[in-house]
Image (spheres, grey):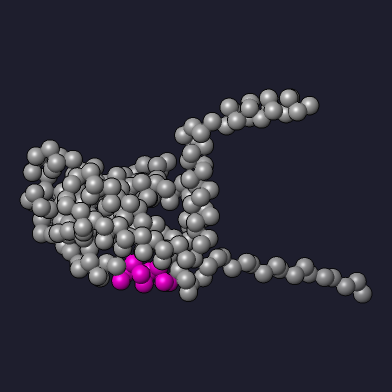
Amino acid sequence: MVTGGYVRSINRDLTNRPDGAHVRRALEQWWTRAAGLPWLPLALVVVILVLDAVSSQVPFHVLWTGLLDEPAHLATTAVVLLALAPRWCARHPGLSLVALAASTLIDVDHVPLFLGVDAVAASSMSRPFSHALLTPLVLLVVAALWVRARPVLAAAAAGVCLHFVRDLGTGSGLPLLWPLSSTDVAVSYPVYVVALAVVAGYRLVGPARPSRARPVPRATSSVG
């Protein structure tokens, strides 16, 4: 009956509400499909250029600058992951999302600076000391000790490192070698963009998908 089918459809829709698990699965499915698009990393480089062009025309503001900078961090991380490790991204979408999240969540350490706590950085113009290689190193040490959380922590460490890739080419750089040195390490913005473009270009010319293993011929025995 039409009525019965309609009721079953409503029940199915109510059962499949977009809770956290459904949202996560949808994101993982989207990311898996994205890993099969060779042109996507290069398109994301264009997105980064647009975001940075808009940001350069907007006076600094914590909210507006953040709304432009954080998507550019996500895009930078996605470019590197999708271009250099598309097979890994397709096989481990959940860990890929962890890396993407970590590449933006590290900026939470700016909050004390915005609240006037200058001790977390060398100066008010510098990024916090936690923007150093020590942070992903600590994550990797914990990952080595905590076996059950090792994949997640390792993915988070990778995401933090990819966050640093963008920070090297924007602003004043970052205190990469802290606590050994609080001097900011930086490269020019064109170097950052060209490096991303080269990585994205590699995805276009590199292997697009895993090669299929050749079937092993069955051995035939002759009876003599």
Determine if residue 205 is in view: yes
Q: Give residue 146's position: percent from left, percent from top.
A: 36, 42
Is 188 a magenta residue? no
Determine if residue 176 is in view: no
Name the residue: 18% across, 47% down: 61
Which span of residues is magenta-colored? 194-202
Name the residue: 24% across, 56% down: 55
Task: Between residue 127 and residue 129, name the one nearer to us.
Answer: 127
Q: Is residue 159 above or below residue 213?
A: above
Q: Is residue 126 above or below residue 201?
A: above
Q: Give residue 202's position: percent from left, percent from top.
A: 43, 72
Name the residue: 16% across, 52% down: 59
Task: Between residue 210 and residue 54, name the one nearer to us.
Answer: 54
User: Quadrant of the rendered structure where residue 3 is?
Assistant: top right
In the image: residue 4, left or right of residue 119: right
- Please identify the quadrant where the N terminus is shown: top right
Q: Is residue 24 above or below residue 16?
A: below
Question: Looking at the image, how many numbered discs can be counted on the residues?
Answer: 0
In the picture as drawn, the residue positioned furthest to the right comes out as 224
Q: Is residue 144 above or below residue 42?
A: above
Which SS type dominates the magenta stretch? helix
Q: Give residue 14's position: percent from left, percent from top.
A: 58, 27
Is 201 a magenta residue? yes
- Please identify the quadrant where the C terminus is shown: bottom right
Name the residue: 16% across, 50% down: 60
In the image: residue 92, left or right of residue 169: right
Task: Between residue 60 and residue 125, name the one nearer to us.
Answer: 60
Q: Give residue 162's position: percent from left, percent from top.
A: 31, 57
Task: Between residue 101 and residue 180, name the one nearer to us.
Answer: 101
